[in-house]
């Protein structure tokens, strides 16, 4: 069984494994920087049983390297009320950070 962890960043939870590339909401770091993802909500080292935090796993760390920063595809929101002449079009592009997971350290 491979090692994995559940981390929270940007208000979302991600299941990550070493060597994986994950796209998360923007983190204030440049390409090549090493970052520590916290909090770690659950961790499995591969040999031992899965440790689930209440609410976080104390002493567990996930380190990652920032690969690049990119923008997601545009999401268009269009509102209209028929026969009233009301139309509203709003677009949004989320900025993402691509992370390469380096290591998962269980407590």
Image: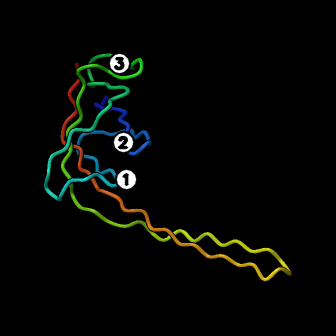
Give the image location of residue 10, x and y in percent. 39, 45
The residue identified by callout 1 is: 25
Indicate left or right for 76 with 26 as reference: right
Scheme of image coloration: rainbow
Please give the residue where the numbered disc 2 appears in the rendered image: 9
Of the pair 86 and 16, the residue shown nearer to us? 86
Disc 1 element: strand
Give me the residue at 23% from left, 61% from top: 68
Residue 18 sits above or below residue 21 on the image: above
The quarter of the displayed image where residue 39 is located: top left
Residue 41 image offset from top left, x and y in percent? 37, 27
Q: CA distance from mark 3 to mark 2?
A: 19 Å
- N-terminal label among 3 and 1: 1
Q: Could you tell me which residue is drawn at 22 percent across and 18 percent down?
A: 107
Q: Are marks 1 and 2 in contact (CB under 8 Å)?
A: yes
Question: Label 1 neighbourhood size at 10 Å, few (<14), some (14-19), many (20+)?
Answer: some
Tell me if residue 69 comes above or below residue 7 in the rendering.
below
Eye-nearest disc, 3 or 2: 2
Q: Quadrant of residue 52?
A: top left
* 20 lies above or below 67: above
**x and y percent of residue 37 in the render?**
27, 38
Please tell me the numbered disc located at residue 107: none
Residue identified by numbered label 3:
51
Q: Residue at x 42, y 39 (%)?
A: 13
Q: Nearer the viewer, mark 3 or mark 1?
A: 1
Could you tell me how far apart the alpha carbons at marks 1 and 2 are, in whole angstroms? Answer: 7 Å
- Classify the position of the N terminus by image quarter: top left
Label 3 neighbour load within 10 Å: few <14, some 14-19, many 20+: some
| Most foreground residue, 66 or 83 | 83
Mark 1 vs 2, N-terminal side: 2
Q: Is residue 4 left or right of residue 89?
A: left
């Amino acid at each position: 069984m491979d090692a994995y962890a559940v981390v929270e960043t940007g208000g979302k939870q991600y299941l990550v494994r070493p060597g994986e590339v994950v796209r998360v909401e923007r983190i204030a770091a440049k390409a090549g920087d090493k970052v520590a993802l916290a909090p770690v909500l659950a961790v499995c080292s591969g040999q031992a049983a899965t440790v689930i935090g209440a609410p976080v796993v104390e002493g567990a760390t996930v380190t990652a390297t920032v690969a690049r920063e990119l923008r997601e595809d545009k999401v268009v929101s269009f509102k209209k009320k028929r026969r009233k002449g009301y139309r509203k079009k709003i677009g949004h592009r989320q900025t993402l950070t691509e992370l390469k997971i380096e290591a998962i350290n269980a407590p």
